[in-house]
Amino acid sequence: MNLEKLGFSRSTYSEVILTVRLEEMINAAPMGVLLNEGGKIYLRVYKGQRIHDMIVNGAEDCVLNITSDPILFYNAIFEKEKIPYCPAERVSSPRIRDCDAYVECSIINVTGHGEYVKAFLKPLLINVAERAVSAYHRAGPAIIEALICYTRLLYFKDADREKAESLKKMIDIFRDIVYHSTENNRLREIATKILERSEEALLTKKTTSTRGLPKKS
Ligand SMILES: Cc1cc2nc3c(=O)[nH]c(=O)nc-3n(C[C@H](O)[C@H](O)[C@H](O)COP(=O)(O)O)c2cc1C
């Protein structure tokens, strides 16, 4: 198995859940990753996030947990304490249980670019679970898109109110998609919670946080 076969690309972000350890501290967060010319993986991590500080302060390795489970993506932002970890094979950072595949990496370089750092990863081990394919569902991708809008809304809410309001409208649309495409109560509840959290964020006063994702559009 190689990274291209797993869907990694030089042109299109692969959205994974990154797990990182720094001493006793463990964290997980969704991240977009790309391949570069040398076959290495890199990601852009914005300031104001815990995972940014862990990488800048010396985390040596990480795991790219590959999953399309929207609940794992949701928990990796809102309910991190619910993430079920298990040990990795080659690195000190843990895996998240029951993902479709894992790429265990060492962090070989970190470069600063103002609002974000680029972390360059060397893959040490790729492990793919044997699992039946599953048909496409609309609800999962709609939830993951809503989460992306939410983290971008946190970034824009003080800097560009109009943009933040339009992200909230998109979250509303993704919630509609979830309600149209599933009767699963947990997924519906999650879609509603993301919308509520967005509304709350728009009501709160200016913060120093720079969390979020200005990169993709
Ligand atoms: C699908 C998805 C992809 C994301 N990609 C990135 C990314 O590439 N870089 C980034 O800095 N934040 C990204 N985020 C936002 C972070 O995951 C989010 O801010 C997270 O809460 C950070 O957690 P932390 O503060 O514990 O580090 C992404 C969010 C989602 C939902």
Image: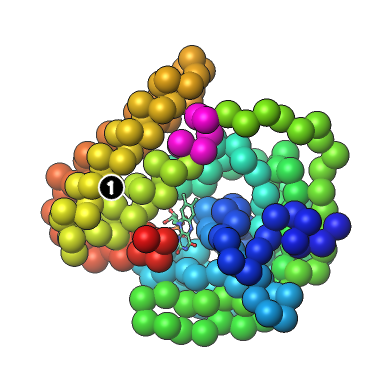
Identify the residue at horizontal 52%, vertical 54% (top origin).
29
Q: Please tell me whether the stretch drawn in magenta is mainly helix, strand or loop.
A: helix
User: What is the quadrant of the C terminus in the image?
Assistant: bottom left
Residue 142 falls inside the magenta stretch: yes
Q: From the viewer's perspective, is residue 52 above or below residue 7?
A: below
53 relative to 83, above or below: below
Above or below residue 78? Residue 133 is above
- SS assignment at label 1: helix
Residue 8 appears in the rendering: yes
Tell me the residue that label 1 is attached to: 167
The quadrant the N terminus occupies is bottom right
Cβ of mark 1 under 8 A from ligand 1 = no
The residue that appears at 62% across and 41% down in the rendered structure is: 68
Question: Viewer-proximal residue, 207 or 66?
Answer: 66
Q: Position of residue 96 (x, y in %)?
A: 67, 47
| Residue range highlighted in magenta | 138-143
The crowding category of the residue bearing disc 1, from other C-alpha atoms within 10 Å (few below 14, some 14 to 19, many at least 20), is many
Quarter of the image holding residue 203? top left
Residue found farthest to the front: 11
Placement of 13 over or under 133, stated as above or below: below
Q: Amino acid at mark 1?
A: Leu
In this view, the residue in front, 103 or 215, is 215
Position of 103 with respect to 214 (left or right) is: right
Residue 207 in the image: x percent, y percent? 21, 61
| Rendered image quadrant of residue 89 | bottom right
* Spot occupied by residue 81 in the image (x, y as percentages of width and height): 52, 42
Looking at the image, which residue is at 53% across and 58% down? Answer: 31
Viewer-closest of 65 and 169: 169
Q: Is residue 188 left or right of residue 36?
A: left
Residue 43 position in % (x across, y down): 55, 69
Residue depicted at x 75% and y 49%: 101
Specify whether residue 185 is painted magenta: no
